[in-house]
Amino acid sequence: MKKVEGDGSDGYLNLEEPNDFFKAFYQTVTLDESDVPGTEIAKNLSKWDSAQFLYHKHASEWYDKAPEKESIWESLLGKFTSPHFAELIEHEKERVDNLVWMQDASGLGLSKEVWNWWPIGHGVAFKSGCCITKDMLRKIWRRTSVTDDFLESVADEINEIAVMVKLDTKLRLDHFFAQIQQEVGENFRLEEDLTYQESALKEFSYYKLAEHTSEAATDAFPDRAGRALMTDAEKQAKYEVIANKIYGAHREGTEFALGNTEFGDGWKYRGRGLKQLTGKDNYQDITDWYNDLWPDEQMDFVATPEKLLEIKYAVRSGALFWLKKKMWDKADEGDAGIIVDKVTEIINLATDTKEDRRKHFNEIIKERIFNEAI
């Protein structure tokens, strides 16, 4: 839950110059700190699901009588010249005078500014928004190495935050888990598998550079038989070399920059969580978004990136990426393959796994996995 202070606001949204209350409201709901016009705020007021988690403080509409709201009437009349609209305003003034009551109850000591809440929205907030079960997830992750307890923990975490992070429709769940299936693989790994052989390494931008191409042969892991002969220390050394190269500083200044500017950042901020979050910038973003949504916890995933290997934070990091990057908005466009591709491109613009992700999505649809989840 969050609160938005609005002392001094009359509750009127001026489309040209929204007041501080509506700006704060917009920033709290969307986690977007940029200034936007009142038209954008008005457009979104009816569909901001997260508003159900807000308490707002502003002047009550039950306090001032019509003459005390004259600035509002003048503003409205200045936008419409129809005499019928003027008559409507007069009727509205009468209605307001008949409804306001707080000044008449002055003995109660009520303030003009009061805390407001959205009862319909809270009615939604009191239910989980969806009810995913481990049996549903088992239809996606069939390997016995993925335990029932693990899948149940993932399901419980999603159910707890589903409405808040816009995983509250069947279509959104279909898209979300099709992407997660590709990210974590059939073993549901919460940490990136860096066991790349030479051909795979050569697909990364670092090894595509002429001066680094030959390094792929040296850095790559051998085949399964060869890996069996390696010590844990040898494997660890290769993991770190690969991560530091493929996620290193050569990306900075390009559209694929990750914020990994220091040696070792590639390994430190390797892929983790449901979305396989990668790069220092992304870890910082998740930290900021997390603390906005759950301010009582105040996490720092830049300082403690390994926290994303815990189920709670692994799930929430993936869900926050879905929310903040507005993947849900793209998912709402439908179930066509081209829509799946658009969702995929938000995660990884240059990926060669679009066909795989389409396949995951179609299988989820075909098996009706989340039909009973909402």
Image (cartoon, grey):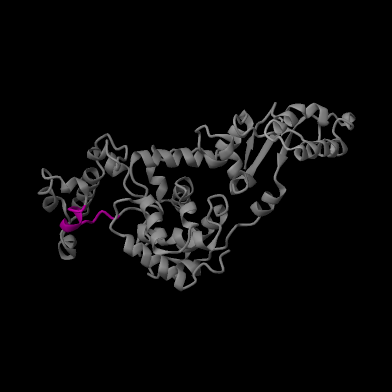
Residue 209, how many percent across, how many down?
15, 45
- Is residue 63 visible in the rendered structure shown here? yes
**Number of numbered discs:** 0
The image quarter in which residue 254 lies: top left
Q: Position of residue 168 (x, y in %)?
A: 56, 57
Is 170 or 272 nearer to us in this picture? Answer: 170
Identify the image quadrant of the C terminus. bottom right
Using the image as rendered, state which of residue 345 and residue 94 is in the foreground: 94
Foreground of the two, 196 or 147? 196
What residue sits 49% from the left and 42% below the top? 290
Q: Residue at x 55, y 54 (%)?
A: 162
Image coordinates for residue 113, horizontal then vertical, percent:
74, 30
- Where does residue 26 sit, x and y in percent of width and height? 57, 37
Numbered range of the magenta stretch: 193-203
Residue 197 colored magenta?
Answer: yes
Quadrant of the frame with the N terminus: top right
Residue sticking out furthest to the bottom: 367
Q: Is residue 371 above or below residue 188?
A: below
Most frequent secondary structure within the magenta stretch: loop
Residue drawn at x 73%, y 30% as measured from the top left = 72
Asked if the stretch drawn in magenta spans residue 106, the answer is: no
The residue positioned 50% from the left and 57% from the top of the image is 332
Image-based side of 158 in relation to 95, left or right: left
